Image: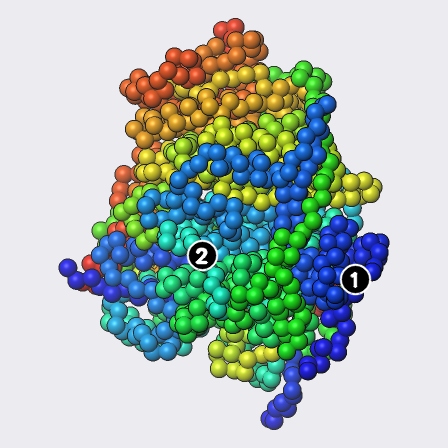
Amino acid sequence: MSIKIQAANVHLIEVKLRTEFNDAEGAAAFALLREQGLSALKEVRTGRLYEVTGSLTANQAHQAGKDLLCDAVTQEFRLVPPSPAPMNGMNFWRVEVWLKPTVSDPVGATVAEAIAEGGLQRPTSARCGMLYLLNGRAVKAQVEKAVAKSLANPLIHRVVVTEAHP
Amino acid sequence: MKKPKVLILRAAGVNCELETANAFKHVGGDPELVHISELRGGKKKLMDYAILSIPGGFSYGDDVGAGKVLANQVRHTLTDLRQFVRLGRPVIGICNGFQVLVKAGILPHSNACDQSASFTVNDSGKFETRWTHLRINTQSSCLFFKGLPEMIELPVAHGEGKLVLKSPRHLEDLKKTKSIALQYVTEDGKLMGYPHNPNGSIFNIAGLTNPEGNVLGLMPHPERFMSLHHHPNWTRQTYRKAPVGLEMFKNAVDYAR
Amino acid sequence: MSQLAETNQDAFPILGKSPKDLRAIGAQRHLSLSDAEWGAIQAHFKTLKREPSLAEIETIAQTWSEHCKHKTFTSPIRYTEGKKVRTIKNLFAETIVAATESVKKPWCLSLFKDNAGVVAFGKKWALAFKVETHNHPSALEPYGGAATGVGGVVRDILGVGLGAKPVLNTDTFCFGRPDYKGALPEGAHHPTRTLRGVVAGVRDYGNRMGIPTAGGGIWFDDDYRLNPLVFCGTVGIMPQWAVKKEVKPGDLIVAVGGRTGRDGLHGATFSSANLGADAPSSAVQIGHAIQEKRVLDALLAARDKKLYGSVTDCGAGGFSSAIGELGADCGARVRLENAPLKVSDLDSWEIWLSESQERMVLAVHPKSLKALEAVFAAEGCELAVLGEFTRTGKLEVVHHERTIVELDMKFLHKGLPRVEREAVWTNNHAAKPAGGVTKKAGEALREMIGHLNVCSREWVIRQYDHEVQGGTIVKPLQGVRHDGPGDACVIWPHAATGDMDDFSCFAVGHGLNPDYGRIDPYWMALAAVDEALRNLTCVGADPSRAALLDNFCWASPEDPKQLGALVRAAEGCRDAAKGFSTPFISGKDSMFNQSKDEKGKELPIPGTLLVSAVAPVPDGRKAVTMDFKGPGNALYLIGRTNDELGGSLYHRILGRTGGEVPKVNPASALDGFKALHAAMTRGHVLSAHDLSEGGLALCAAEMGFTGEFGCLLDLDECPRDPRIYSNETLLFSESPSRILVEVKPENESAFLRHFGKSAKSAMVRRVGQTTANPIIKVTGLEGSTCLEESLKELKEAWQTALPRILG
């Protein structure tokens, strides 16, 4: 298989806690969102998103995900394809919370450094986002409003809410 | 008397190195703060030391997971660590240092050298500082606990200290190999939930050792109990035993002599 | 020539422009310059016969900002009190500085001029202490604002003298009530969200840096709902030789730490501006604690090798302020292209003014550069030479061969025009209490102990690593179950000194009560100093060696009433410092803490003064905690109870107004504190706790449930104003300077001997004893029981109040 190398590849690496482990961060987010009126919410699971820009190939990004970003016991990871996720109604929501590009991202800085230290090409940029997977019926505007009042601050965060797979 | 050389490992974000060094110095050790970059560059060599201590802190901010980045560095830089362990030299990882030992596959001991345990966020969802009652596993032969009473007290301070295992089968392995060194208990020695078990660790595990007993990883901070005046109730004069940390570090230094 | 010269960023024409035009330009760029300041700038450039550059205007605006120059405290004030009018030339010099000079303490090593105040700690060591506020950023983004607040004050400690090792962080907050149900304007965070975010920010930055956060407090009042106050303090330890710093012409300007980005532009000018919905997102940042830890480790290693002559932190104004300050007495030439950048598309002025976190600037002799580079490289910490200090008396900044700033240091630092402001103070408070409901003593006590301003802070405290560095030997949570409210922490700084055989310790105490200030800010200031000192004394610190910090947070000083109240408070500080013979060593102020509420009406915060005090505990092994230690011990009350319920918690829960505000008599208060300290050093004191909100009843209840013993008290035995005939007044009055003390029966006479004459003048009296039965039982003036409550129930009310709201 030949790998096409581009000047700047952007990889989105998603790391999630495996479902068999208790997600205390998710429980905290769940309580906050319920406070904001998402009363039909059943569960929130969390994960981290790493957007790595640079000359890494998909294989190298995969390796970084496996060795550096994902815990061998508690977490699972995948490279998120750029195509939009299929929709399935209003029962599951995927919420991504990113720092705006003008705001410094210390976790991203650590990741870029660690990737370079691991022997791979230093990324030109690495950004870290929070991932919340919401299980429960809601309307998009409602989710966006609740997130803006609890998990994200519109002043410094960019929030992406999409319908998602269970 | 000979002062055993103690390597106190440093890296960005490690922050309990000075009190850990003081603890070793206080019991007759010769601690030296060594940055991992000095080991990587070959300026310093692990094998020149009698004891290795990985102190607490937030190595690399605990970004991407507590101790994860430093654990990777330890895997790649301290390639002689397994030999160091095989030679029976004492190794202690405290809090973040415990997380590093686990994520680097040093603890719990396995022949495959794979990571079989890990840590998640405390069940309470919060970073918490509190003094805990602990029970030493008298079946295990961990050298750090030699001569200590079964019931001890030490403080914990962490947000990501819930020990989890790859599968339930591993817990049986740990019991069989006497790898469980320390458990969170109530004052009268019972296994109970929060807040006695401050993070929700499986089987209330607070510390792990290897079957040989020369490697110890624990979430509580023995370097914070070097004097009776560290105990939260010293002004009540109700604590009548020796300071736990003092005894533990002394054991390591005596052993290395 | 660089292409950048072609862009219009250099030109900033102001000559010949009208004040109105300049105001408009200033507003557009968030410059916060007044008409008079614009006038001075115009006049200066007229004599230079040229237009300023944008970078020059920005530099001047930052340097002259309220944040950097403290204009309110240093400008003339026309003060009217009743019919009396007088002019104050410089409020700061005439109150805080004057009082400190008059008490003349040889152990003060550095006062007011450096990044923190410094006092001697034993013969070899020195303690540096600074408290900063980060209010506006925390209102906009509680987590990031509070975290960078901690980062900023820690850098102050790294940048005092040649740098001190941070050994303690303190945090004090004022928030709206977390159960606030009313409306909020667009964009404002609910107080609960602010609280959670601020606590998380302080926690994450302090814990990551490995500095124990132990000490402080929280005050809830709905008038803070739009303008929360976040006070972050740090204590550092340094060898005494490192207190002095000096910049020499020829020294290199070396920047270390984080890279420069677009973040934090206009922080200084923004902090003086009215908080509005149009706040620039760049005013808020996310901190990088590990970066700052790297700076800390490298800097202190370089300090001990004596590799630099001076250092300061990059705070508000970024490089412009840091280099401008360091080079103020000589001059500096900067080559901006050498600054490491986060992003490549920064304009020259942005690099120069950026407030990116975790950066420090050093003055380095060229011969030391190589060794310095090695130290920083070993810690993975970036370093760049930005230029050199000169003898020109000018601040010159060049970016790619293009001069963007050429300013006279004298004009920059001394050219700020002083404009006289009006201040008015009128005392219109009713001395007689009025209104409200009545409540039985027991009911009132139960309500008070669960009140938000009293209840347990365990939810917050446990999230901080208050034991890192292994020196917190008196902990914030005390007693049998490690959950009672300690007066202060005692820190044994062996991690900094390397000496575990030396038990020299120190403690930090705080005083804050804006409710007293609503009645009279003068007495609020005295009460704050008194509270900070009695907290210190209660744990065993030496009250005669205490040093104070002031932090004023006020609404708009352009409102004469607000400014009048500020003058009163500053004069209270002056009289407290003189009366207690205790110097102020540093301080800070934050003005314009007011915002438009949901109806567009201005909501000012109540005038708020935080007094922080630090004092040595000569032998930490003699420290004292506040929990009752056993049954059958004598209880002594130090200090006189007066009818002083004005601004009290008791009045607040009754809904009552008026009444006398607590008034401090510093001389007799200090006598009591000193005598108690002497008794403690002899081991004659089992427990001690200060009487503050809620008075005697609340104090005794806290000591009881923390130690799990009860007590019997007799109000008729209280040292008091003989005109008091009300049990409630004796139970709940908040008269200052009072401490309840537990003494073993066999030590009673020895204990009393420390009080000498004052024992006879009835300043200290045996008011009861401890009991095995965990209840608080009080005999009233008429001889029958006036209060009897189960301590278990009181403790539950005290413990559950905050978690019930916060989860």
Which residue is the extreme one toward the bottom?
A2
What chain is tagged by disc 1?
C
- Cα separation between marks 2 and 1: 38 Å
- For the point 73% across and 73% down, the residue is A85
Q: In the structure shown, which secondary structural element does the residue marked by tag 1 occupy?
A: loop
**Earlier residue among tags 2 and 1:** 1
Q: Is residue B104 visible?
A: no
- Same chain for the residues under marks 2 and 1 in the image: yes
Task: Residue C396: give its label.
Answer: none
Q: Amino acid at mark 2?
A: Lys
> Which quadrant holds residue B110?
bottom left
> Which x, y percent locates residue C288?
55, 62
Q: How many marks?
A: 2
- For the point 58% across and 45% down, the residue is C588
A123 and C31: which is toward the camera: C31
C271 and B228: which is toward the camera: C271
> Which x, y percent locates residue C458?
51, 41
Dot 1: within a 10 Å radius of its alpha carbon, few (fewer than 14), some, or many (20 or more) residues?
A: many
B83 and C469: which is toward the camera: C469
Task: Residue C14: give its label.
Answer: 1
Left/right of residue C370 with respect to residue C259 in the rendered view: left
What chain is tagged by disc 2?
C
- For the point 66% across and 42% down, the residue is C75
On screen, residue C746 above or below A103: above
Which residue is the extreme one toward the top?
C782
Left/right of residue C385 with respect to residue B212 in the rendered view: right
Dot 2: within a 10 Å radius of its alpha carbon, few (fewer than 14), some, or many (20 or more) residues?
A: some
Q: In the structure shown, which secondary structural element does the residue marked by tag 2 occupy?
A: loop
C541 and C712: which is toward the camera: C541
Residue that numbered label 2 is attached to: C245
Q: Amino acid at mark 1?
A: Ile
